[in-house]
Image (tube, rainbow, N blue to C red):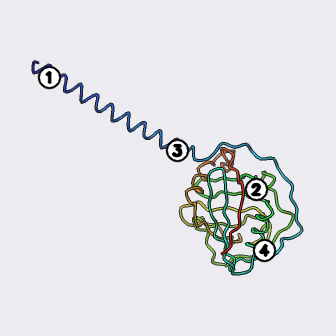
Amino acid sequence: MSRDRRLFVILLLAAALVAGVLVIALDGGDEEATTTSGSCESVEEPEPKEVRFDKPEQVLERGERASAVVETSCGSFTIELDTRGAPKTTNSFAFLAEQGFYDDTAFSRIVPGFLIQAGDPLGSGTGDPGYSVTEAPAADAEYLSGTVAMAKNPVEAPGTSGSQFFVVTAPADAGLTPNYAILGEVSQGADVVEAIGELGGGGPDGEEPLQTVLIESVTIERG
């Protein structure tokens, strides 16, 4: 084989090798993207439901160790409930969970890099359980990443809550004023919360889910 011929073959093999590396890199990237976007099951939007209570029953004692396991169409995450700092708020949430109130409801608000919000049986962002409790947070309360707090109407008193709750997904402090009763914090499944948080940004205000994320059940675990 002539020198020029050998050089041509070497250059051809090198080009093929580079092309192969690029194909592998691109295939790997596509696979990773598919895994991330495919971590949530495709589900139908649930039907609105009317569930009303006069008041919550006492199901948790102040200081009792308890957590809530939230099963969603994106996986599960666990909320460590602050029963000592917010006994009325955590008791109300646990009562509703044990009544199946949150089952088959969807996240109604997802703001990427800020929060994910759920707990509305109507799916419109206006639903409630028929009652409210009030438990103002500490004046120096911070809403850090992973904090779970209760949503409220702007005209309601600080710490007022019904059934809707949100999880902070901001990388640091969300910058919220201490007006929202703190339910607890995410102790497991932060990756699931992050996956849900990536499915927002729709609608004219950029706060609507891009696909339905369903809460299948909320289970209260004690001890």
Asked if disc 4 and disc 1 are in contact, CB closer than 8 Å, the reply is no
Residue ID for mark 4: 59
Residue ID for mark 3: 35
Q: Quadrant of the C terminus?
A: bottom right
Give the residue type at disc 1.
Arg
Q: Between disc 1 and disc 2, whose residue precedes?
A: 1
Which numbered dot is residue 6? Answer: 1
Name the spot of residue 166 as percent of width and height, x first.
Answer: 68, 61
Q: Is residue 155 left or right of residue 22?
A: right
Choose top left, top right, bottom left or bottom right for residue 78: bottom right
Q: Is residue 182 above or below residue 208?
A: below
Mark 4 → mark 1, Cα distance in angstroms: 82 Å
Name the spot of residue 210 as percent of width and height, x first.
Answer: 65, 44
Give the residue type at disc 3.
Thr
Q: Between disc 1 and disc 3, whose residue precedes?
A: 1
Give the residue type at disc 2.
Asp
Mark 2 → mark 4, Cα distance in angstroms: 18 Å
Residue density around tag 4, few if under 14, some if 14–19, many if 20 or more, within 10 Å: few
Choose top left, top right, bottom left or bottom right for residue 149: bottom right
Q: Is residue 30 left or right of residue 118?
A: left
